[in-house]
Amino acid sequence: MSSRRLRILVIKPSSMGDVIHTLPVVSALRRHDPDAEIRWLLHPAWRTLLDGHPGVSGIVLFPREKFRGPAGWVRSLAWLRTLGDWKPDLALDLQGLLRSAFFARASGASRVIGLSDAREGASFLHGERVAVNQHNHAVNRYLGILDHLGVSRQESPEFLLPKGRLPSGFDATSPYLVLHPYARGKGKSLDEGMIRSFLRGVAARTNFRVIIIGRGNPIKNLPVMTEDWSNRTDLLGLIGILRGSSFTVSSDSGPMHLSAALKSSRTLSIHLWSDPLKVGPFFGDSHVWKNGKITQVSGLSDAWRSPGRPPTALEMETLGFFAADTGFQQTV
């Protein structure tokens, strides 16, 4: 019998939220087989999220930007040869796109496994398909691959993330709230009026500072209790700020999922149109806003899947009240 360790290639290159949602799969695989060699195919932008993770033996970087243009094709062929040299036993395609399925095949894995909600014809390249409910939360969909492999799920999915560090010059000696207003998806970001209304609500309740984080267009002439750290933090700095926050309010975005994984009960996600049961915070003690209502994730029902709308100025002030009151409770 061969003594070679089981080799597993996890394919989930991006985005931030998707990478975070995949972490419990790797933790469960490592718990099931402590000797397995688990490598993760990842976009370089998210490498910090996996550095030091005890379940990850190695990272296969997918530098997508270097593969563009005629010269990029040559570089991509060399990269594919490197990918295939390792020859994993299992390739788990959790990205579910044609390109990721092709990578799984190119790895030379004995078993190529994907999910039933794969797109772009990726399923034709999967040797095995795991049936999942496309309306379930992403974490639960990804965990379905464990059932297929006969790997026990942990009672509470484990999101192991770096400790992070506070950015140079950041004052963590007094309590603060965090607002992350930006998002990549169209119509998911908070505009300037919404941000100012939220700040008015906070100021009416507490003297806590509000730290604005993320990547976007900074707003000028903000209230004195506001510190704009937009475009000024790397991932470790973002994690450091979120770990110290008394409460975080965020658009539906990667940093929201980061906050929810770090401090679930101190996170609220604003959903303008997206489905919070599918892409909202995972743990039941996190909070969600949609269509003028706030509830914990544990209280969500199918009614929350319906189309949403932007919050009004008064609703954003109410969110400011809620964040201030909840954040204050967390500090006493």
Image: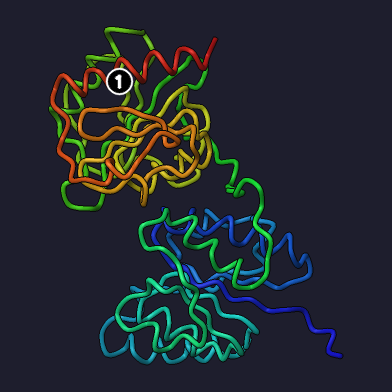
Residue matched to label 1: 226
Q: Is residue 27 left or right of residue 118?
A: right
- What residue is shown at x 45% (from left), y 33% (from top)? 286
- Mark 1 closeness class: few <14, some 14–19, many ≥20 residues within 10 Å: some
Q: Whole-percent x and y of residue 314?
A: 16, 19
Q: Secondary structure at mark 1?
A: strand
**Colour setting:** rainbow
Q: Nearer the viewer, residue 307 or 163?
A: 307
On-image quarter of the N terminus: bottom right
Q: Whole-percent x and y of residue 187?
A: 16, 47
Q: Nearer the viewer, residue 206 or 281?
A: 281
Question: Image height check: is 152 above or below 291?
Answer: below
- What residue is shown at x 33% (from left), y 47% (from top)? 253
Q: Is residue 288 left or right of residue 51?
A: left
The three-letter amino acid code for the residue at tag 1 is Thr
Q: Which of the 4 quarters of the picture holds residue 116? A: bottom left
On-image quarter of the C terminus: top right
Q: Total label count? A: 1
Q: Is residue 295 left or right of residue 24?
A: left
Question: Image height check: is 262 above or below 17?
Answer: above
- What residue is shown at x 44% (from left), y 68% (from top)? 13
- What residue is shown at x 33% (from left), y 85% (from top)? 72
Looking at the image, the residue that sits furthest to the front is 302
Q: Which of the 4 quarters of the picture holds residue 55? A: bottom right
Q: Nearer the viewer, residue 136 or 122?
A: 136
Q: Nearer the viewer, residue 101 or 137?
A: 137
Q: Which of the 4 quarters of the picture holds residue 203? A: top left
Q: Whole-percent x and y of residue 257?
A: 43, 45
